[in-house]
Image (cartoon, rainbow, N blue to C red):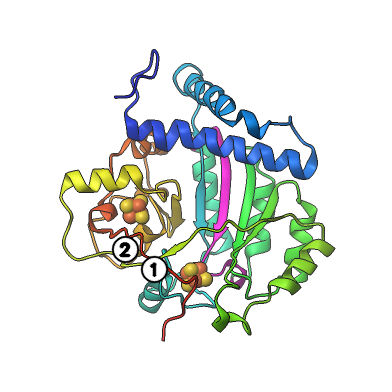
Amino acid sequence: MLETNKYDISDVFYKRYFEQNSLNRMAMEMLKFMWFKEGKFLNPMKRNEILKQYIEDEKKDFFENNKLNIPQIEFCITTKCTLKCKDCCALIPQLDKIKHSEMSFEMFKIQLDKILDAVDSIRHLVILGGEPLINPELPQMLEYAANQEKIFFTQLITNGTMLPSKNLLETINKYNNKIYVYMSNYSENPELESILKQDKIKDLLKEYSIKLQKPENWPWVEEYGLRKCAYDEDITKQKFLVCNRTKCNQVLNGRLDICSKATAGREMNLFEDDSIDILNSKNLRQDLIDFYQKEYMNACKYCVLTDIKVQPALQEK
Ligand code: SF4
Ligand code: SF4
């Protein structure tokens, strides 16, 4: 247990819930101030101090005010993608070959409503795929999300291969202080030169005053997917504690998984399903609290993590 003043909080619960909520709160508030002068200025030089205060706020919210805040939740709205990246960390090329899923607006709304009913806020909602621009109901989904008071900020992630439709641009423009775009940067890969439309997309977003987040330079690592036999429990727990994807909790087909790789494995029946059943849960709020306290999920027992750097978005042959 960590020394957490008067509360008993396990390491994993602290990291996944209290720290992650505080980090996301800080990141989202900084973006809102930088882009729209909304809220208050947070001095980046005082990052550690602010983070400490936010963690204390989060503890108070949870233990004293009975509030449950979701740091981040991702909705995979299609498993179809315009690219077939060999090292896709969501295993999209393998998954879509076996089982294609496309979320309807109706299903998006039902799942999001269930989650919103169970919690007090979602600090960061992420809409992704595959390539989410493939889903024709994306504008309706974004509009619905932008109208939810409990959602602080929504991020749309695109791989930069598809031009956004007029309808999509107008929708994001209408809610441009609630929705922003993140475009992955695969320009380091020369084989994608003829496919990427990044400059044209940037021009369109600018024309519609849509905020585009600067891409982070995360190194790509070789993706080994999920192996057949399980790692032992101690190794799995250690992996889980250091894995930076435990925050990427993803919704697909009525279930909430720890990350997109876990979603792919569950959809392909590669291990026993221990995801949250959003649609049939009798007490989703409690299921979510339990989820944040888990020391690992079944997918993690089979997950191979590496740090072998590779070129971004190398395509399957
Ligand atoms: S990494 Fe992104 S662009 Fe590449 S296959 Fe996966 S989802 Fe598609
Ligand atoms: S399955 Fe578990 S260990 Fe693997 S990437 Fe996802 S959260 Fe991390």
The mark closer to the camera, 1 or 2, is 1
N-terminal of the pair, mark 1 or mark 2, is 1
How many callouts does the rendering have?
2
Magenta segment: 118-134
Secondary structure type for disc 1: loop
Q: Is residue 233 above or below residue 185?
A: above
Res 2 seen here: yes
Question: At which x and y percent is residue 43?
Answer: 68, 31
Q: Quadrant of residue 305?
A: bottom left
Residue under label 1: 91
Q: Is residue 30 left or right of residue 234?
A: right
- Mark 1 CB near ligand 1 (8 Å cut): no
Marks 1,2: beta carbons within 8 A: yes
Is residue 79 visible from the viewing direction of this image? no
The residue that mark 2 highlights is 265
Q: From the top left corner, tell me how far across and down residue 22 is, in percent.
A: 53, 32
Residue at image point 42% right, 82% down: 316
Is residue 125 on the magenta stretch?
Answer: yes
Ligand 2 within 8 Å of disc 2? The answer is yes
Residue 90 within the magenta-colored segment of the rendering: no
Seen at 72% across and 41% down, the residue is: 32
Amino acid under disc 1? Leu
Callout 2, which amino acid?
Gly
- Marks 1 and 2, Cα distance to the nearest angstrom? 8 Å
Picture quarter with the C terminus: bottom left
Residue 5 in the image: x percent, y percent?
40, 14
